[in-house]
Image: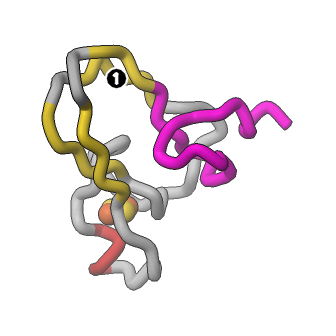
Amino acid sequence: MAYENQPHYVEETEGIKYYCTCGESANKPYCDGSHETQNTGKEPKEVIIQKDRRVGICDCGNTKTSPFCDGSHNS
Ligand code: FES
């Protein structure tokens, strides 16, 4: 499964989240452990969501504000 050229938008709930940064998860935008089984050399990004909110998670791999989309997929 490759990176996609658009973010994943999620109505996120508060708590600790682990977002995929390798592009291989079958449960995007969340890590499913595929980074280990496929030896991607990447690790999930841990984020503490302070309150329920909508987030855009990068899936092109080019963001400079990982794990959040910064619009780099458009450039
Ligand atoms: S599956 Fe992609 S970082 Fe874990």
Q: How is the image coloured?
A: secondary structure
Compared across the picture, whether 55 is left or right of 30 comes to right
Compared to residue 60, the image places residue 22 above or below, namely below
Indicate the position of residue 42 as horizontal and vertical percent values: 44, 73
Does 69 appear above or below 41?
above
Inspect the magenta stretch and tell me whether residue 71 lies in it: yes
Classed neighbour count for the residue bearing mark 1: other residues with Cα under 10 Å, few (<14), some (14–19), many (≥20): few
Q: Is residue 65 left or right of residue 44?
A: right
Residue 47 position within the rendered picture, expressed as x and y whole percent measured from the top left? 30, 45
Q: Residue at x 23, y 27 (%)?
A: 50
Q: Is residue 55 magenta?
A: no
Amino acid type at image mark 1: Val
Magenta segment, prevailing SS (helix, strand or loop): loop
Residue at (45%, 81%) from the top-left corner?
A: 41
Q: Is residue 68 left or right of residue 13?
A: right
Relative to 8, say whether 63 is above or below: below
Q: Which residues are magenta?
A: 56-75
